[in-house]
Amino acid sequence: MVTRNSSSLDPFFAPRGVVVVGVSHDPTKLGYAMAQNMQRSGFPGAIHFVNPKGGALLGQPVYPDVTAVPDPVDLAMLLLPAAGVPGVLEQCGARGIRAAIIASGGFREAGPEGAALEAECLRIAGGYGMRLIGPNCIGLIDTHLPLNTTFLLPPGPLPGDIGLLSHSGAICAALIDWARAEGLGFSQLVSLGNQADVTEVDVLAPVAQNDYTKVVALYMEGVSNGRRFVQQAIAVARHKPIVALKVGRSAAGQRAAASHTGALAGQESAFDAAFRRAGVLRATTVEEMFNWARALAWCPLPAGAQVAVLTNAGGPGVMAADTLAARGIPLATLGAETTELLREILPAAASLANPVDLLATATPRQYADCLRLLLADAAVHAVLVIIPPPPMDTAAGVARALIPLIQVSDKPVVIALMGGALIQEAIAYFRAARVPVYRFPEDAAAALAVLAERAAFFKRPPESGLLRADVDKAQARALLAGQAPGFLPQEVVNGLLAAYGLRTPPVALAADADTAVAHAAEMGYPVALKIASPDLPHKSDVGGVLLNVADAEEVRAGFATLLARARAAAPQAQLLGAHVQPMIAPGQEVIVGVVQDAQFGPVVMFGAGGVEVEGLQDVAFALAPVTASDLKHLLGKTWAGKRLGGFRQMAAVDATAVREAIIRLGQLAVDFPELAEIEINPLRALPQGAYALDARARLCESGAV
């Protein structure tokens, strides 16, 4: 395996001189476009061209190779056949160039031969301490330096304040064109391609540190190193907001897992948990990502979550209110003074409650006067203004009246400007004033919800994972020593739980009916009987659990029934007999599980327990070790968590014991990454305490995940 080097990325973002290798004299070739873009970009440093044919291009000399290029040069852009790239990298390294962008395709994405070429490029770069972006990328753009290393057709992106990192070059090209039409500009844009060396984790901080970047947008098809990503994103998100679009959701959860946790905790659950831990805002569409980025870049953050809606039509106001409610954002209750002042301004038929409906006859002056009152109300933290084309005035007139108020406000204001041809002038006014404008109320309301989420993130103090000192790690290690990969014996699982302070009922293995009767008599009736087999992790699926077994006769009959059911359902399964346990008092049953994610490490699941957990999917996820915020999320997002406090005829149970079970099981998985998955289902919460009634754990095939 070739390791990535850790040399500085400064030459990518602040080069003194750039050499373009593979320029072409043919205007129809990408090499010509790359040379032209560099020259037209306005780059203040030196620009050099290389092609073995020499000559001149665009009024500049073309050098035969990199070694002939004069100083200064510290960034190379390579656009030539893949087979020729390693040789040119050798020249760059010998020349002292420490950064290269490989725009060429034909590497790992093309098959084994291309993968070997890519590995060779990485080996050469590592030997010289050189960093690589790509291959198979379009490079980077800095609109403020300025610098354009791409071969994309002009015009390029507008200068702006969104830093874009993308795993897809084609997406970059499309977004540049789309963003221009939307009036959105970029500070920097980095296309990462195959990420042979430089990854999204590497460039996240440099792009965020750019003075012009107000928000970082990520188009992700995966993550190169999940643990590093979370660490970097946590540090960045405290200073600049991060909005991510992670695609490939449909491939989630396709792991071969035998536990409920493993089946439900797919890749996307891990990404959700990682983004939440790091403060990354996860969008579901490209448009949503940039809708949010626009608001985050241009608006102040609200002091709270309460929103006022100002409209000249009732229907759009209801649409906005519905979206806000769905996202947990309350409508502000306007103060009595605000209501009275609105009454003096508006017609008698106007609605003075929130949403405030000015009616179709609203004038620009009325819009402005009402917005001024809403912004002055202490109960209002943000305002959503909806403007369908006014029948008596113009949308542009409303825009001109509102913009001066919005620009001096310390509260965010977003605009839903509905229509087509009649609103184009107003759109131009708002964009020029850096006021977020959306085509429909739902999008504007969603943007305000994201601003509230970002504000709440800052109110969340930095926190570390919750760990417990009263665990017996040595005992757990001794129990795992010598265990074979696969599902662990029940006695070992119960021992692991006990070592980490998790209570289980007494359990005894009976290889025959007589032994089962003896165990039951010692424990006291009634008891539970459970089939014992390493091949049947889901006992209930084969009818392998019998509850409230009342006496010795029922134990004997039940033992025979369990074995018969298991043999019928799984003839090849290894049957060890049955486990005998005393019955535990009724309570609320939940599931707590942990699965090791290859990128992000242990991911904790909590939710409604029992045999229907996968059908109900009343579950939530968090990274381990869990934090106080994670516990709040796990219990607050699930009905199982909300029920812990009691509901109707159901008594409250010990929520503290449930929280402790989550913390301790997560810590067990952190301490022993060789545990591929471990699950308690059900964990029965009682008025005091909680018991792991059934638990299973699986050891990785070889070492940690």
Image: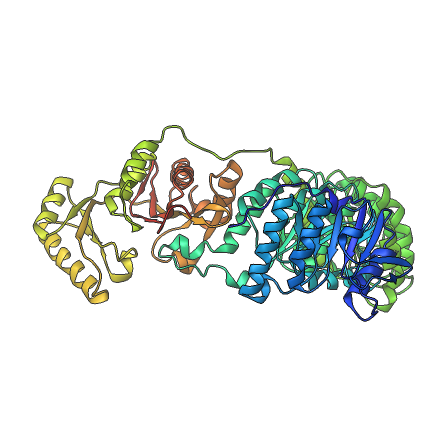
**Residue at image x 52%, y 55%?**
268
Please identify the residue farthest to the bottom as the structure is shown. 28
Q: Quadrant of residue 87?
A: bottom right
Q: Residue 383: x and y, percent?
A: 76, 48
Tell which of 250 and 676 is nearer to you. 676
Residue at 84% in and 52% down: 47
Q: Position of residue 165 (x, y in %)?
A: 68, 52
**Residue 627 placed where, x, y %?**
50, 37
Q: Residue 611: which quarter of the image? A: bottom left
Could one spot residue 96 in this view of the protein? yes
The answer to whether residue 287 is left or right of residue 419 is left
Task: Kindly identify the residue that appears in the image at 91 percent across and 63 percent down.
Answer: 392
Query: What residue lies at 82% left-to-right and 60% top-to-bottom?
Result: 35
Q: Residue 657 sits in which quadrant? A: top left
- Residue in the foreground of this view, choosing between 395 and 280: 280
Q: How is the image coloured?
A: rainbow
| Vertical side of 691 occupied by 398: above or below | below
Name the spot of residue 129 as percent of width and height, x first.
64, 43
Reply above or below: 142 against 499.
below
Evaluate whether residue 354 shows in this view.
no
The front one of 274 and 369 is 274
How many circles with numbers are drawn on the protein? 0
